[in-house]
Image (cartoon, rainbow, N blue to C red):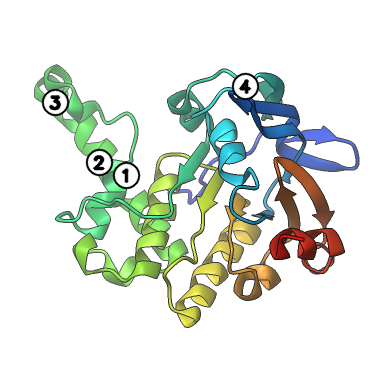
Amino acid sequence: MSESIGTLQLQRKGDGEYVLWTENVVKRFGGIIALNKVNIKLRKGKITLLIGPNGSGKTTLVNVISGFLTPEEGKVIYKGKDITRLPPHDRVKMGLVRTFQIPKPFQNLTVLENVMVAAEGNPGENPYIAAIFRSKWKKFEKEQVERAFNILKWVGLVHKWDSKASDLSGGQLKLLEIARAIMKGADTIIMDEPAAGINPVLVHDLFDRIVKLSRERHVTFLIIEHRIGLVGKYVDYAYAMNMGEVISEGEPEEVFNDPKVLESYLGG
């Protein structure tokens, strides 16, 4: 059985291949401009970092990209399609999945069961098909179990397949979220502070896995993170925001040391 997790539909824009980008996105809350003509681009199979002080607009931007907010102006383009007004569940079907800072697995289910729940299109969920075409849904479930085990191998959780989610560490829960996203069909994953509350040693293990998925499986990541000293070396490109605008972008070290970025964190 193939271990493919989906073929990216690549779009070429400028000098590189991008799977997602925003065009002059504006979002207002009353008289407050939360996003002011924001442009970012995610190159396929790469890890893009989004940083900035609290209130800079990072979460608002992610909410717009993932479909939880609709901008007043601008566009979100994914795989060459305008998804600006597409609801979140339709974006998930296209392969764009968001995880949250606090993972919410089914605590009493095993790791394998948590991944299996994310599988789409199980014919056994239809009582008529389940009763009449038993071999069809049994074949589907066997294939999905194999696929789930392969995904657990990729994220380094196969040894925990029969453990309950409630027994996992913080870092393992973040890996489980990635596994569920890929099982759902994701080839682009947005992660909100994956290093939050995790031991530094486990942060490195988590990001080693993220790098492996991006390099070997061509999964694209957009990551919001405050612990840039820990994760900076793992990312390919970085954006910094402040007061609703992108104030710096480029190689991670250049962005981290940009005077405008340092000033934004110091509040000067």
Residue that numbered label 2 is attached to: 141
Query: In terms of secondary structure, where does tag 1 sit?
Result: helix
- Percent of width and height locating residue 86: 54, 19
Amino acid carrying mark 1 in the image: Gln
Q: Is residue 97 above or below residue 254?
A: above
- Packing grade of label 4 (10 A; few <14, some 14-19, many >=20) is many
Question: Looking at the picture, how far across and down is residue 143, in whole percent?
Answer: 32, 44
Residue situated in front as seen by the camera: 170 or 4: 170
Distance, label 1 to label 2, CA atoms, is 5 Å
Numbered mark located on residue 84 in the image: 4
Question: How many residues crowd mark 1 within 10 Å: few (<14), some (14–19), many (20+)?
Answer: some
Whether tag 2 and tag 3 are in contact, CB under 8 A, the answer is: no
Callout 3 amino acid: Ala
CA–CA distance in space, label 4 to label 2 = 35 Å
Residue marked by disc 3:
130
- Residue 248, given in percent of the width and then of the height, sits at 82, 53
SS at mark 2?
Answer: helix
Q: Quadrant of residue 257?
A: bottom right
Crowding at mark 2 (Cα within 10 Å: few <14, some 14-19, many 20+): some
Gap between marks 1 and 3, in whole Å?
A: 16 Å
